[in-house]
Amino acid sequence: MGDHDALRAALLSRVATLTNRVGRIEQDLRKPGDRDWQERATELENDEVLEGLDALSLAEVQQLRQAVERIDNGTYGLCAGCGGAIGAARLSAIPAATTCVRCASLPAAERTS
Ligand SMILES: [Zn+2]
């Protein structure tokens, strides 16, 4: 513990930002749509965009939470595929990465361990 304190805080603040955004999107989706049909058509298109964002944000929140869990149990930075260290460059690009570059490029079935 200690090495990843700053990263852990950054991950949690990102989770908070995304969670707030998802909350706002869900409120938007629940707005009553008592307008004429033309406005409703536009509204439906917007809803599709919002739903896409929603799913992406939720997926990212899940990955970030898992990264925080890995920091907490001491497995952060270790590849889930081969158990080796995930490169620092990869972690700074993708803080929630669970596999090293090599394993990420292999289908799960071809991993040896
Ligand atoms: Zn690996």
Image (spheres, rainbow, N blue to C red):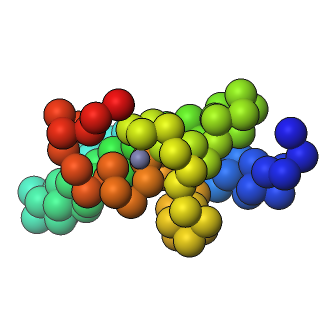
- Which image quadrant for residue 48? bottom left
Q: Residue at x 75, y 56 (%)?
A: 7
Visible residue check, residue 86: yes
Visible residue check, residue 25: no
Residue 80 in the image: state x and y as whole percent.
Answer: 45, 37
Q: Residue at x 64, y 35 (%)?
A: 75
In screen coordinates, is 3 left or right of 38? Answer: right
In screen coordinates, is 27 left or right of 51? Answer: right
- The residue closer to the viewer here, 90 or 55, is 90
Residue 46 in the image: state x and y as whole percent.
Answer: 25, 61
Location of residue 39 with respect to 8 vertically, above or below: below
Q: How many marks?
A: 0
- The residue closer to the viewer here, 101 or 15, is 101
Question: Residue furthest toward the right?
Answer: 2
Residue 111 in the image: state x and y as whole percent.
Answer: 26, 38
Question: Residue furthest toward the front?
Answer: 112
Q: Residue at x 50, y 38 (%)?
A: 83
- The residue closer to the viewer here, 109 or 19, is 109
Q: Residue at x 17, y 61 (%)?
A: 45
- Which image quadrant for residue 31? top left
- The residue closer to the viewer here, 84 or 73, is 84
Where the C terminus falls, by quadrant?
top left
Where the N terminus falls, by quadrant?
top right
